[in-house]
Image: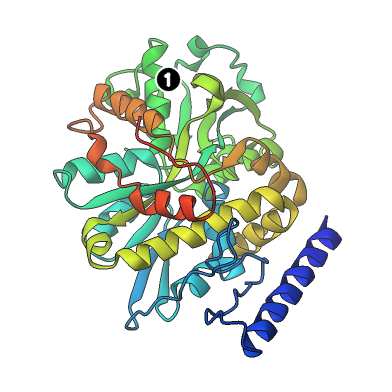
Amino acid sequence: MKAFWRRCISSMLLLSLFAWVLSACGSGNTASAPTLNSCGVTNGTPTTTSTPVPPLTGTGITVKFGYFPNITHAAALVGLSCGTFVQDLAPNTIKETRFNVGSDLVNALLAGSIDIGYVGPSPASNGYVKSSGSALRIIAGASSGGVLFVVRPDENITKASNLHGKKIGDPGAGGTQDVSLRHYLQQNGLTPADQGGDVTIVPSDNSTIVNEFKLHQLDGAWMPEPFASRLIIEGKGKIFVDERDLWPNKQFVTTNVVVRTAFLHDHPDIVKAFLRAHVDTVRHINVNLPDAKKRANDEIASFAGQTKLDQKTLDAAFSDLTITYDPLTSTLFTQADNALALKAIKAKPDAGIYDLDPLNSVLSSEGLSKVFVS
């Protein structure tokens, strides 16, 4: 596959060179030839036409960009590794900020410290509701699935009723996995200890949860990838619930791309360029998964306190995940219903949380089907 991809890149480079020669010889085509980043993704070149998209004419704007060291954020990790975002947003620049929990990223966005970010549906919904629908918009999806409820085998947890008296970890109060865990407990007649029940929910950062699980300080955890697979491989845990099994067609949005509404209004061309890079990166991941896995792993290892995943964990983490630019809008509204029932949000977001016009413009230019709010 790698040899095939290298041949493809070589062929594309030759075609680009040939196009430049034709232009230099007076072919009448004044547009510059498309360029390739290190992943072989064409900068702004739709698949259905040979006419490249003009480069941005920015004024040196710094785009403040946030994301997590999670495989559910693979599009962000791989896009940064490939240089897709840097290339498509030039001459503007990117300032990266790394987060561990969605509420922190959304709070940073509400404060103006983040312009564009990758975040789960529950924090996005909460930020939209808290700002009365003014502060942010979801402009694309990024992943579906990739969330597991893992338990310790020695606790003999084989059915929901066995969770009485147990300690369960998740990445943070009010986050997407926290809402999913609490909804699952509610659906099975169980009550968290902080609401008078006997199931103790322990919110903490992902790495801490893995360590506490390995030390038998937690009986289980509802976690995103790659931490779910780390619980299984490093912590000898077992899958109790694959969250995909709780959703129709085994699809539900795990990660979205969000933008500050003001930034979207002020810089629509930059947002569109970012989405072009995002779509190209998603497509690269899905056609060249081995390369994408390596790049995502390298990016994760660059985080403070993180180490590279072994190949077994990396493969397992990607196996229960779908990388997609489709925001799977109906599943966000279902998650919002669940959060509302748990009083995790004060109101349900309306369809205004989405602005998919920039994404659909990119998809149309590349000959891809549009996505809609449903």
The answer to which image quadrant residue 211 occupies is top right
Q: Residue at 58% x, 61% y: name it.
A: 49
Q: Is residue 355 above or below residue 38?
A: above
**184 or 48: nearer the viewer:** 48
- From the top left corner, tell me how far across and down residue 217 is, in percent: 53, 36
Check disc 1 and report the residue beneath it. Answer: 184
* Above or below 228: residue 15: below
The image position of residue 112, as x and y in percent, is 23, 64
Query: Residue 75's quadrant in the figure?
Result: bottom right
Residue 84 drawn above or below residue 20: above
Q: How many labels does the image show?
A: 1
Residue at the spot 42% in from the left edge and 27% down from the top edge: 181
Measuring from the top left, give residue 8's x and y in whole percent. Answer: 78, 64
Can you tell which quarter of the image residue 188 is in?
top left
Confirm whether residue 69 shows in the render: no
Question: Which residue is painted at 58% across and 34% down in the image?
Answer: 216
The kind of residue on which mark 1 rests is Tyr
The one of 357 and 173 positioned closer to us in this rendering? 357
Which residue lies most toward the left here? 132
Task: Please give left or right for residue 175 compared with residue 299 in the image.
Answer: left
